């Protein structure tokens, strides 16, 4: 099931489908493996994905699934030790929800990441 991803201003920034993150134009930009998010083009570790929240490498939230309530991590997340292999290129979602209505993003304790979603993907 495809899910909307929103930033701190409750704006739609991506779609999540079966562990694959797609831009709003449905280009594959990242994937989730073992609770961590990686760039689909560079395989670089972007940060953890926990409790429906995408975190930067410093433990601050960057984006979240609709309805998530982020709270800053208590400790800086550790980068996974093993390198990740790129999964097979996923099929693009054929349909996205037409009537997407965002829930206002909560202000997490410890604040949002200084990176916006595009900066986070490009790191």
Image (cartoon, helix red, strand yellow):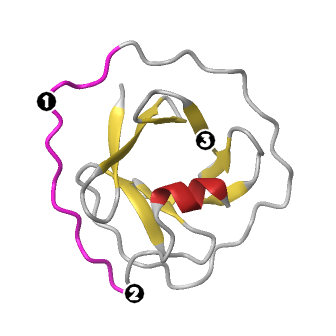
Residue shown at 13% from the left, 30% from the top:
99
- Judging by the rendered image, the residue that carries numbered circle 3 is 30
Is the residue under label 2 in contact with that under label 1 (CB below 8 Å)?
A: no
Is the residue under label 1 in contact with that under label 3 (CB below 8 Å)?
A: no
Please tell me in which quadrant of the rendered image residue 107 appears.
Answer: bottom left
- Judging by the rendered image, the residue that carries numbered circle 2 is 110
Distance of label 1 from label 2 (alpha carbons): 32 Å
Determine whether 116 is above or below 25 in the image.
Answer: below
What SS does tag 1 mark? loop
- Judging by the rendered image, the residue that carries numbered circle 1 is 99
Determine whether 78 is above or below 88 in the image.
Answer: below
Residue shown at 31% from the left, 65% from the top:
8
Mark found first going from the N terminus, 3 or 1: 3
| Magenta residue check for 106 | yes
Of residues 115 and 38, the one drawn nearer to the viewer in this rendering: 115
Determine whether 74 is above or below 3 in the image.
Answer: below
Distance of label 3 from label 2 (alpha carbons): 25 Å
The overriding secondary structure of the stretch rendered in magenta is loop
Please tell me in which quadrant of the rendered image residue 17 appears.
Answer: top left
Q: Residues within 10 Å of mark 2 (few under 14, many from 20)?
A: some
Mark found first going from the N terminus, 3 or 2: 3
What SS does tag 3 mark? strand
Mark found first going from the N terminus, 1 or 2: 1
Distance of label 3 from label 1 (alpha carbons): 24 Å
Residue shown at 14% from the left, 42% from the top:
101
State the extent of the magenta-drawn residues as a range. 95-110
Q: Position of residue 33 (x, y in %)?
A: 65, 43
Which is more foreground, mark 1 or mark 2? Answer: 1
Q: Give the number of the disc on residue 84.
A: none
Which is more foreground, mark 3 or mark 2? Answer: 3
Left/right placement of residue 54 relative to residue 13 reads right
């Amino acid at each position: 099931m495809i899910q909307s991803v929103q930033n701190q201003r409750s704006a739609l920034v991506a779609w999540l489908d079966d562990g694959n993150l797609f831009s709003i134009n449905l280009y594959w930009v990242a994937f989730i493996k073992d609770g961590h998010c990686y760039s689909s083009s560079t395989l670089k570790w972007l940060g953890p994905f926990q409790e429906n929240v995408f975190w930067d490498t410093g433990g601050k939230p960057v984006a979240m699934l609709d309805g998530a309530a982020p709270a800053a991590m208590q400790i800086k997340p550790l980068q996974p030790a093993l390198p990740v292999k790129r999964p097979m290129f996923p099929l693009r979602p054929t349909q996205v929800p037409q009537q997407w209505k965002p829930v206002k993003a909560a202000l997490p304790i410890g604040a949002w990441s200084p990176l916006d979603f595009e900066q986070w993907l490009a790191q």
